[in-house]
Amino acid sequence: MLGGFYASVALGLTLVFGLLNIVNIAHPAFVVLGSFLVYAANAQWGVDPIAMGVILTPLFFLLGMATYSVYHASFEKRDNESLRGLAFFFGLMFIIEVGLILQYGVDYRLVNAPYIGKVINLGSVTLPLRMLVPFCVALVMALGIFLFLSRTYLGRAIRAVAQDQLALQLVAADPVRIKRIAFGIAIATACVAGALLIVINPVEPAAGRVYIGRIFAIVVLGGMGSVRGTVAAAIVLGIVESVTSTIYSPSWAPAVAFGFLLFALAVRPAGLLRR
């Protein structure tokens, strides 16, 4: 179930990093931004956090397209997208964090929902609904992204822009427009992932930093641009972390998980599943 949540956070990065080769290290900050907007709606109106996350996806889609437009005009268009582009996303990440701190402070925030605090007992196994519900939502979102990329014209165009932009232009498709839409979809998934995050754990403005290394590791381990590989890698990483935390100590979980990542890439450099 933890791996399912990791998959929801990594899906957006699979699109922008795995397919578009844009190193958006600010992606977890967008996830936390989604968490706080969901918290505000839940605290003021009592709206279900996951439902609110879905409702806010059009807003985040537009935010993502606007972010890519600035990035393209400032860096891609000038063929200067390496270190300066990375600095752009670093700055964006800190702007989001500081904005949230100014608005909400540094305290942890949580939400209320009927499924938080309840469990399902299956014999000797106890499944907390605060983990099970986000896991199911994450799988549905991953399935939707997979079907979109494989069954629709726009989805195939997004995959094509990562392989051959010139060929895409020959069929009268604008690579910049395709990338803008793909980036918007990626940030929209971050909003839903933010809703799942605050259901699972209380959130504070800098919480996204914890997930930067994990989600990049998941995208690489799964196979750059592979949605199925991302889900598989996220579940593997979640299982490794959970087993390590249970048998040894939670402090060892990240080290063992990244050690497993290095071993897996040494055995299979292309990742679990290719694009």
Image (cartoon, helix red, strand yellow):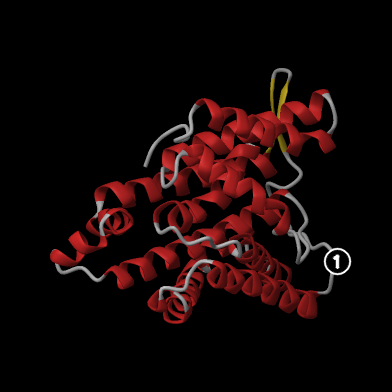
Query: In the image, residue 123 lies at what x, y percent?
Result: 70, 18
Q: Residue at x 50, y 58 (%)?
A: 189
Q: Which residue is mark 1?
A: 107
Q: Secondary structure at mark 1?
A: loop
Numbered circles on residues, count? 1
Q: Quadrant of the C terminus?
A: top left
| Foreground pick, 147 / 214 | 214
Image point 52% across, 45% down: which residue? 219
At 39% across and 50% down in the image, what residue appears?
145
Name the residue type under label 1. Answer: Asp
Q: Nearer the viewer, residue 130 or 230?
A: 230
- Going by the image, does 26 lie left or right of 40? left
The percent coordinates of residue 62 (x first, y second) are: 45, 75
Q: Residues within 10 Å of mark 1 (few under 14, many from 20)?
A: few
* Image quadrant containing the N terminus: top right
Q: Residue 229 at x, y = what percent?
A: 46, 37
Considering only vertical position in the picture, is 134 above or below 166?
Answer: above
Instruction: Give the farthest residue toward the top.
Output: 123
Expressed as whole percent of the image width and height from the top left, the position of residue 148 reads 32, 52
Q: Is residue 40 above or below residue 194?
A: below
Seen in the picture, residue 252 relative to 184 is either above or below; the reply is above
- Find residue 86 and report its image quarter: bottom right
Q: Is residue 116 left or right of residue 135?
A: right
Q: On screen, 111 above or below 2?
A: below
Residue shown at the point (43%, 55%) measured from the top left:
15
